């Protein structure tokens, strides 16, 4: 089985590899979320099975803040920059005034089938939408919130959560909802540490706020609504646990498992509970033994922000996806639709190009596990499925790929080919120095990511 390549080629290849610009490979150095302390038991592993296979999903931030692109009309009619979907807090807009945005929120261009189709065509396998963000406004039919919800208070009078849940089932995507847990600027009983994230302009006395009153009056009823009104909910994506107690987190998790045992929950339910950890806007330098997910914006904001057209390139998104999956994680990529219900064209264009790549190379993403190597190769990343490695080549300055670590695991390369051209076989083997090598063919390179399938065998 042992093949060799001349020492000169090996040395030259190694020299070129060392010269590869590391900045071209997306490996932000960030610590892995350690909040998820609970050991994932058999039930959790069963719930996560589809999610671990899916690897790629769409996050959607949509709410009243979307109406003017996270801006708000000033006294002179000009739009004040609210900074982000947190504009209610940034501009300290009184609740009674903020709620009036619902009077003009009328997203008549919204199409659940279109949104889900965009996600599906991009190669995404699940969708998570903001059912309630920090402003406390319910983007679904929430009887417990009175009129402070999209069905009761807008001229649109439709329930996008219901329509998206139905569209996801029809098109074969899993459906989940985001819920702001420890921040709710519409409720008088939600404190945060030192009032840093609280509504202190309407409710200034933090000492009078009792989280448990809010928990019983709003959280428990709304989570019950979300888990009983829309059929299967695959993911409950909590944000900002803030001042929730350990007992309340445990009570909430028990309610979720009672109503929908298969629903998975992220670590932001608080206190080390949940099925998986969260990395926000960053990719850890290494993976984690616990399931984890990176959530990230496609431009510079979560919600639609007027004038933000700085979209990540398809190359960046694809390489981020590969980097994350090579470390055992999932990628939840966000879009922020407009107040008219339209996903911006810049995002749609990116997702179309990502989908084109996924149609050819999705096999190297779905159902794969982290790279078995201890270190990442300079030329790209590696994912694994069964006895096959997928070599994701970002930068190949030489016709020979080299990497170590396979022989350490008592495996040897048997055959190799381009995933996009399976009939185009490549020479592979082991060098005199014990490194695995694959000989490339320059005419077959994809400028974003050339995927090579390397079949391994374990000798007797």
Image (cartoon, rainbow, N blue to C red):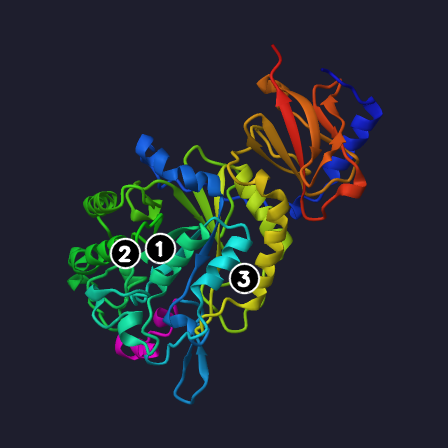
- Residue under label 2: 226
Q: Nearer the viewer, mark 3 or mark 2?
A: 2
Q: Is residue 183 above or below residue 407?
A: below
Helix, strand or loop status at disc 3: loop
Mark 1 is surrounded, within 10 Å at the Cα level, by few (under 14), some (14 to 19) or many (20 or more) other residues, namely many
Residues shaded magenta? 86-102
Task: Pick the residue in front: 4 or 229.
Answer: 229
Which of the pair 420/450 is nearer the observer? 420
Helix, strand or loop for disc 2: helix
Residue 49 is drawn in which quadrant?
top left
Mark 2 neighbour class, 10 Å CA radius: few under 14, some 14 to 19, many 20 or more:
many
Which numbered disc, 3 or 1, marks the residue closer to the eye? 1
Tell which circle, 3 or 2, labels the residue nearer the N-terminal end.
2
Cβ atoms under marks 1 and 2 closer than 8 Å: yes
User: Which residue bears the numbered disc 3?
Assistant: 299
Q: Quadrant of the C terminus?
A: top right
User: For residue 429: magenta?
Assistant: no
Q: Position of residue 132 (x, y in %)?
A: 32, 62
Question: How far from the left and from the top, in percent, is residue 234?
Answer: 36, 47
Q: Mark 1 highlights which residue?
A: 177
Front one among 408 and 331 = 331
Quarter containing the N terminus = top right
Instruction: Please tell me which residue is depicted at 39% across the width and 77% down the height of the picture.
Output: 106
Residue 94 appears in the figure: no
Answer whether residue 282 is visible to the viewer in this image.
Answer: yes
């Amino acid at each position: 089985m042992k093949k060799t390549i001349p020492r000169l080629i090996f040395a030259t290849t190694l020299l070129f590899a060392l010269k590869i610009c590391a900045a071209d490979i997306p490996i932000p150095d960030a610590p892995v979320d350690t909040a998820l302390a609970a050991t994932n038991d058999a039930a959790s592993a069963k719930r996560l099975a589809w999610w671990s296979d899916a690897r790629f999903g769409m996050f959607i931030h949509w709410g009243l803040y979307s109406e003017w692109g996270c801006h708000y009309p000033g006294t002179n009619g000009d739009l004040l920059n609210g900074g982000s979907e947190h504009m209610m807090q940034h501009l300290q807009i009184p609740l009674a005034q903020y709620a009036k945005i619902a009077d003009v929120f009328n997203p008549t261009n919204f199409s659940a089938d279109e949104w889900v189709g965009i996600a599906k065509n991009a190669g995404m396998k699940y969708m998570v939408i903001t059912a309630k963000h920090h402003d406390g406004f319910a983007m679904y039919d929430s009887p417990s919130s009175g009129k402070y919800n999209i069905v009761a208070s807008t001229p649109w009078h439709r329930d996008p959560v219901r329509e998206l849940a139905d569209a996801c089932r029809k098109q074969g995507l899993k459906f989940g909802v985001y819920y702001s847990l420890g921040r709710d600027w519409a409720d008088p009983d939600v404190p945060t540490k030192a009032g840093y994230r609280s509504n202190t302009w309407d409710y200034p006395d933090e000492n009078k706020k009792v989280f448990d009153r809010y928990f019983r009056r709003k959280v428990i009823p709304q989570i019950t609504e979300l888990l009983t009104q829309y059929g299967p909910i695959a993911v409950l994506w909590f944000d900002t646990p803030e001042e929730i107690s350990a007992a309340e987190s445990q009570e909430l998790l028990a309610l979720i498992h009672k109503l929908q045992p298969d629903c998975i929950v992220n670590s932001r339910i608080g206190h080390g509970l949940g099925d998986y950890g969260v990395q926000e806007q960053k990719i850890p330098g290494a993976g984690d033994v616990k399931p984890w997910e990176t959530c990230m914006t496609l431009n510079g904001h979560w919600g639609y922000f007027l004038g933000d057209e700085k979209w990540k390139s398809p190359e960046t998104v694809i390489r981020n996806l590969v980097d994350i999956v090579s470390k055992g994680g999932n990628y939840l990529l966000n879009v922020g639709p407009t107040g008219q219900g339209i996903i911006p064209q810049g995002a749609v264009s990116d997702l179309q190009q990502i989908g084109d790549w996924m149609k050819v190379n999705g096999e190297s993403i779905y159902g794969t596990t982290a790279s078995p190597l201890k270190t990442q190769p300079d030329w790209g990343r590696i994912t694994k499925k069964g006895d096959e490695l997928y070599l994701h080549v970002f930068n190949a300055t030489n016709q020979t790929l080299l990497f170590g670590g396979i022989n350490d695991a008592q495996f040897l390369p048997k055959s190799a080919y381009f995933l996009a051209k399976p009939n185009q076989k490549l020479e592979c083997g082991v060098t005199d120095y014990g490194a695995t090598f694959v000989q490339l063919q320059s005419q077959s390179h994809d400028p974003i990511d050339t995927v090579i399938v390397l079949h391994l065998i374990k000798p007797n």
